[in-house]
Amino acid sequence: MFEQLFNSRLVEKVLFYMISNDRCFANELSQAFEVPVFGIQRSLIRLENQGILVSTIEGRNRIYHWNPRYPFLSDFKAFISKAYSSLPDTIKKKYYERPIRKRPRKKGKPL
């Protein structure tokens, strides 16, 4: 849909994922989209260099989230949200609204 605008299909996927989840890390996206981590990392770095996303380090993971200082953030998120709402529900559930564990498992708890 926006691959020509953003010059990458992965950037489009990252932005749609961010709309539904607000934060992510590269390995999480790699597992969700079943693509190599390198392409995801490159897309995340590109969005960070443009000022749309910022990252923090939590443990050994670099967590990306929206940059609250980006001057056009509300308009940009509204634009991406509108495009996201036009996606079929099957695609949304498969890639963007997956139940992903957000916190660590209790030590000693069986799998």
Image (spheres, rainbow, N blue to C red):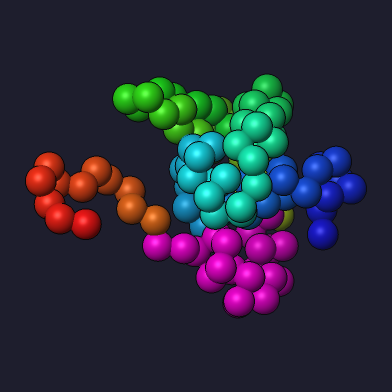
Q: Quick check: 93 above or below 37?
A: below
> What is the quadrant of the C terminus in the image?
bottom left
Residue most extreme to the bottom: 89
Name which residue lies at 49% across and 45% down: 28
Relative image position of residue 5 (x, y in whole percent): 86, 46
- On the question of residue 42 being in view, the answer is yes
Which image quadrant is residue 30 in?
Answer: top right
Relative image position of residue 83 (x, y in whole percent): 72, 62
- On the question of residue 78 being in view, the answer is no
Q: Is residue 84 magenta?
A: yes
- Residue in front for this viewpoint, 14 or 83: 14
- Residue in front for this viewpoint, 31 or 68: 31
Q: Which residues are magenta?
A: 80-99
Relative image position of residue 56 (x, y in whole percent): 43, 24
Q: Is residue 68 magenta?
A: no
Q: Quick check: 45 above or below 27?
A: above
- Residue in front for this viewpoint, 21 or 52: 21
Name which residue lies at 65% across and 47% down: 35
Q: Quick check: 23 above or below 93?
A: above
In the figure, is residue 99 to the left or right of 70?
A: left
> What is the quadrant of the N terminus in the image?
bottom right
Residue most extreme to the right: 4
In the figure, is residue 31 to the left or right of 86?
A: left
Query: Magenta region, mostly helix, strand or loop?
Result: helix
Residue most extreme to the left: 108
In the figure, is residue 92 to the left or right of 100?
A: right
